[in-house]
Each structure stands twice: as C-alpha cells, then as structure tokens.
Amino acid sequence: MSAPGGTAQVKLLTAEVRTLQVGNRQVTLSVFRQLDTLLNLENFEPFGRVRDGHDDFREVKMVGRDTTTDALVGARIRPQFWLASDGPLVFTHWLSHTWSYDQPFGTPVTVAIDARSRGDGSYSLRWRPEVKLRCRKIHVTQDPGPGVEICYVDLAHLGKVVQELADEELADQIERQRHYEQMTKLPLIVLAGLR
C-alpha cells in the first residue's frame, strides 16, 4: 500500500512484562496487599515497582526482600517535599538578632541552596523561625549599662552553626530525593488478580 511520501509499514514492537513468583506460584495483588510494609528502606532490597490500584501518582510502591529477615515485603517511598519547615531553635535565635527584612518575623527564609541540583536552585532549604521563641533581648558584645536585658551570644559563631545545620539537612533531603528518583526507575512488576 502506498502512502503520500512513501510506503506504509507495520513495525513489530516488543515489550517485557515482569511477574513475581514464589515457588511456582505468581504473587497476586491480594498477596501483595497482605505483605508487611517496610518503613526503613535501609533493610530493603527492591525487586521492582508495583501498582495495586490505589496509587498516589507521587508515591512509588515496591516489592522486595527484607535483608534482615529474608521475608518478601512491600515498601513505599514518596518524593522529598521542598516546602518550608520549622527551623531549629539556634536558627530562630540567630535570626532574632540579624533579621532586617521587610517581611514579618516568622516568614520562611532560604538557608541553603544546592547549586549543582538543576541549575535553577530548585533544591533549596527554607526554614520558618518560631515566632514565640524569638529572643527579645538586645544583642551587644559589651555591657551597655544597668536595666537592659542583654544577649551576649557570638553571632558569627551562631551563624556558622546555623549554616552547618542547614547544609547538613539539605544534603539529607537531596539524598532522599535522589533515592526516590532511583526507585521510580525500577522495572514494573505486573501482579495478577482483580483490583
């Protein structure tokens, strides 16, 4: 058969369908739903992703082996949510003495950005200071006289501690995000049975 611009062809495509078997029996949806779910993925050896009909498009459900017990188990992982979280007390204290923005105290502040992420700063950590824990004392390095509540904290040291904590938390969040992205690339295992 001729088509405008050339000859029409039918191409044969192949696809791989993976199933999971225990012994000579295929694992079904019903069996998968009854498996224990591992919350700690450090002890999880994934076999592949599964869909059980109750899928959250962001959550990856997996089936695999618990490396501590050798049991067949399920697991799930969600992406890292890049929303502002409550900052540690040391951050609130440091910010109390360095806040100079037009926004009210309590507004989330970007404390760390991973420049290597995607080039657009999408991997960034934002902390929200705890308003009720704000230091209300005057910050000075020398005693200004009687009757003044003073905070003698070393702001340079406190700022360094805050940055180290922020960098560490951002690195942990990026690691969780990358682990999630790896799990999304696992092969899909098709489970038999009714939904």
Image (spheres, helix red, strand yellow):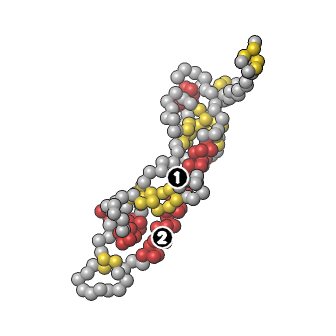
User: Which residue is nearer to you in this view: 188 or 22?
Assistant: 188
Does the rendering let one see residue 71? no
- Left or right, residue 153 beside residue 49: left
Residue at (56%, 49%) from the top-left corner? 177
Query: Does residue 159 lie above or below 87 as drawn?
Result: below
User: Which residue is nearer to you in this view: 69 or 116?
Assistant: 116
- Left or right, residue 122 beside residue 16: left
**Sequence-first tag of 1 and 2:** 1
Q: Residues within 10 Å of mark 1 (few under 14, many from 20)?
A: few
Residue at (42%, 63%) from the top-left corner? 88
Query: Does residue 189 lie above or below 114 as drawn?
Result: above
Q: Position of residue 93 (x, y in %)?
A: 37, 69
Residue at (39%, 77%) from the top-left corner? 153
User: Which residue is nearer to you in this view: 35 or 54?
Assistant: 54
The residue wearing badge 1 is 122
Query: Does residue 74 lie above or below 147 as drawn?
Result: above
Mark carried by residue 167: none
Quadrant (top left, top right, bottom left, bottom right) of the N terminus: top right
Q: Position of residue 75 (x, y in %)?
A: 56, 39
Query: Disc 1, disc 2: CB below 8 Å?
Result: no
Q: Position of residue 141 (x, y in %)?
A: 37, 83
The residue wearing badge 2 is 161
Disc 1 marks a residue whose amino acid type is Ser
Disc 2 marks a residue whose amino acid type is Val
